[in-house]
Amino acid sequence: MKPIEAASVPAKPRMVFRQVRIASVKPSARAPRPAAADIAEGDTIERNAVEEGADPTPSLARTGRGATTNPSVRFETQATVPCDDGWGSLEDGFASLPPLETVLIRDHSRTAIARNTSPDVGFDRSINPYRGCEHGCVYCFARPTHAYLGYSPGLDFETKLLFKPEVASLLERELRRPSYKPKPITLGSNTDPYQPVERRLKLTRQVLEVLLRFRHPVSIVTKSASIVRDLDILGELAKLRLLHVYLSVTTLDPALARVMEPRASAPALRLRAVSALQAAGVAVGVLAAPMIPGLNDAELEAILKAAAEAGAERAGYVLLRLPLELREMFEAWLREHMPQRANHVLSLIRQMRGGALNDATFGQRFVGTGPYADLLSQRFERAARQLGLNTRHTEMDVTQFLVPSAPAAMAEAQMSLF
């Protein structure tokens, strides 16, 4: 499906219901609604819906999309709640929803490099040419960040994509600053740099071209086989020991992958990309991420074995994270696609998260706690050891960084400031 480009932020799509009521909501994330007692007194309509045993938000599941809901932006003070009039009109209306097209929105950010101080990650800077991700992975921890832009973390996240057309020039400007100190930059820390729109816009490729000219180290995380389109640049970076690549492989089951991450590359294509990268001399690894207990965690050893056979040197895993709206969204997805397994999966998640569906504590959020989490960690360590993974690690060389001569156009632009 060809994306539609919008010159400005488009109006949110309207849906017509027979009855629509306005419910007050708090300007913060709402957790899943296990019981009516957990709902604030002001949320009367949602309280009534829970007491009646009904879900106030019908499924918005669409072919080729991951999320089954489109929750309100948590910073807004009101939300519309659809309500049936007793004639089944609500169910009929939602059953005939049209396909959702991808809309591209220009991002006017004036910087390219984002900084972080998290002790849980091994980098302090990253670049995201895109915000939102068309892959539609239902479990994506980055979904709640779309609320900062005024969009829903649900279907909006995978259909309203912001792109940064000037990301390469902004990056070059930042790298030329006398105060800049080089350290590895990560591509793909928030949204996938090789999501389908990259085939058209090539913003990630432009970023890599800048990094190669500056001899700047970079690591890439993706679940797209489209990364092999840039093997010419990646091969040059690898020769200079400036590159690490990780392919995320969540499952080897194409049917599960299709419903869980509908527009990402098929698992077999990702493993084929691992082989192509390894053959080109790229230090490549595989992330079995996220591991979802009761859903795909039984595949952990098989994923690592397939990764090793494809040529991966390193591997890692991350436990499912469900921050903010994602708790409710993931539960809705489970009950839509796997109703018989939903309660079991949610129970296992709570066992690994201290009784909740999410724990953001540093040092625990990626691996969880409790016996089930400990067993998962032991299984990973044993399989990695038996397969010879993580026995060697190619360090990236930060000493090669250099600032090339400024192009004439850039020099003229700089002189125009004086």
Image: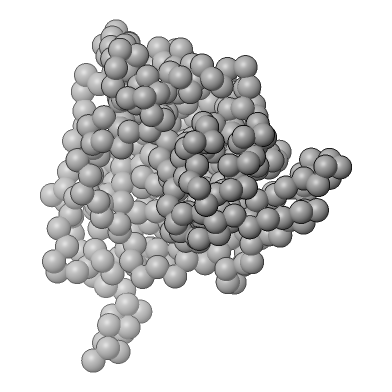
Q: Is residue 353 above or below residue 216?
A: above
Q: Is residue 356 visible?
A: yes
Instruction: Determine the image quadrant of residue 365.
Output: top left
Q: Is residue 278 left or right of residue 37?
A: left
Residue drawn at x 30%, y 65% is: 172
How many numbered marks have been drawn onto this rendered protein structure? 0
The x and y percentages for residue 7 are: 59, 72
Outermost residue toward the bottom in this view: 418
Q: Is residue 288 above or below residue 265?
A: above
The x and y percentages for residue 51 are: 62, 34
Of residues 240 and 369, the one drawn nearer to the viewer in this rendering? 369
Q: Is residue 216 above or below residue 283?
A: below
Instruction: Determine the image quadrant of residue 141.
Output: top left
Residue drawn at x 72%, y 47% is: 83
Of residues 280 and 250, the one drawn nearer to the viewer in this rendering? 250
Residue drawn at x 44%, y 56% is: 27
Q: What sort of colour scheme is used for the picture?
A: one colour
Of residues 382 and 292, the one drawn nearer to the viewer in this rendering? 292
Q: Is residue 237 left or right of residue 302?
A: left
The x and y percentages for residue 205 are: 43, 53
Outermost residue toward the right in this view: 87
The x and y percentages for residue 412 are: 31, 84
Residue drawn at x 46%, y 19% is: 347
Instruction: Determine the image quadrant of residue 255.
Output: top right
Q: Quadrant of the C terminus?
A: bottom left
Q: Is residue 122 above or below residue 165?
A: above
Of residues 209 and 107, the one drawn nearer to the viewer in this rendering? 107
Q: Is residue 43 left or right of residue 414?
A: right
Q: Is residue 217 visible?
A: no
